[in-house]
Structures are given as structure tokens and as C-alpha cells.
Image: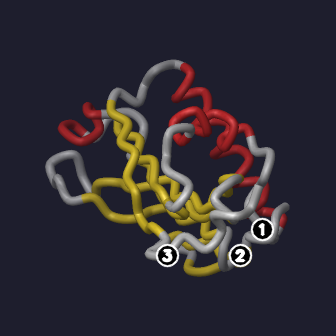
Amino acid sequence: MNLFNAPINSPLLTCITPLLKDIAPQVYKAKVTLVHRPYLSAGLGPHPVDIELMRVLGKEWFINRIQTFNKESPSNNTLHANLNFDFLHNQFHQPDLGHVELNHPSIQELYHSWQDSLLKQIHQGLYDHTTLSIVEVWSSFPFSTVQ
């Protein structure tokens, strides 16, 4: 675990790092959104996922938060937050469960199982739309002299 309690060498981070290679060093927070379009239209297949990342000193990326979304029903197009792994605050949240610390053994097991499933879905090409968003940028990049 790194200083944000997020897995520093997680397979998920390794999988999405290539998407981040061309981001300017003054960007310290970014988000990768994975969408399976048939889920949006028919409620079938993998749920949309937001993976929020942060980096320290303009270099190494860390997973800050992962959030999944679901529809209440196939006919309802409104997405609602479902699973929320908040590594920065060491919290997990699910609407019907509430808040639980990430280091709870059942939550650790859930995360690793969920991550394995997500990685399989990514490698199978089930996410047909990926978006990279810049979330926050240093207004005055204080680390320009760091080598």
C-alpha cells in the first residue's frame, strides 16, 4: 500500500497506466471512465466504471478512487453510484451496506474479486468506450525542479 492506501502495484493500475503516459506533469488528478454501451441502452453487460488517479510530484500515478454505476432497471437510463472504493480515505461504500473501512477482510476480498473480474472484462474488450479526463491541474506547478 502507498501513502494513499491504494495498491501501488495493482494489476488494474498496470493495465490503465499506458492511457496516462502523455499527460502533462502539472496534471495531478485524472479519471479513466470505462463504458460498455449496451449497458447504457439495455442494462446488459459490465457496469460503467470511473477510476480516479492522483500522482505525487508529477511522476507516479496512484489509484485514488474507483466507482461503479448501475441502473435501477433496464428501462431507467439514470445511473446511480454502486460500489465506491475510496483509497484516499480508506473507505468503501455501497448504498445498501453503507460505509466500511477498506482494510476489513471481506472488503479486501470483494475488491480483489471485483478487480479480477474487471480486468477480464477489459482484456475481453467488453468496454467499448474509454474516456480519459483531466480532473485537476496544479495552478503553479511546484515540482518543476524535481528530477
> Percent from the top left, x then y, of residue 7?
77, 55
The count of marks equals 3
- Point out which mark residue 140 bears: 3
Q: Is residue 88 above or below residue 122?
A: below
In the displayed structure image, the side of residue 38 where residue 133 appears, left or right: right
- Whether the residues at callouts 1 and 2 have beta carbons within 8 Å, the answer is yes
Q: Is residue 70 above or below residue 140?
A: above
Q: Residue at x 66, y 68 (%)?
A: 143
The kind of residue tagged 1 is Asn
> Percent from the top left, x then y, of residue 87?
67, 68
Q: Is residue 91 above or below residue 125?
A: below
Q: Helix or strand or loop: what does disc 3 sit on?
A: loop
Specify the quadrant that holds the N terminus.
bottom right
Q: Residue at x 68, y 57 (%)?
A: 62
Residue denoted by label 2: 90
- Point out which mark residue 76 bears: none
Please state which of residues 96 and 122 is positioned toward the viewer in this rendering.
Answer: 122
Residue denoted by label 1: 5
Comes first in the chain, label 2 or label 3: 2
The mark closer to the camera, 1 or 2, is: 1
Please state which of residues 107 and 35 is positioned toward the viewer in this rendering.
Answer: 35
Alpha-carbon span between mark 2 and mark 3: 29 Å
In the displayed structure image, the side of residue 25 where residue 9 appears, left or right: right
Specify the quadrant that holds the C terminus.
bottom right
> Percent from the top left, x then y, of residue 110?
70, 54
The kind of residue tagged 2 is Asn
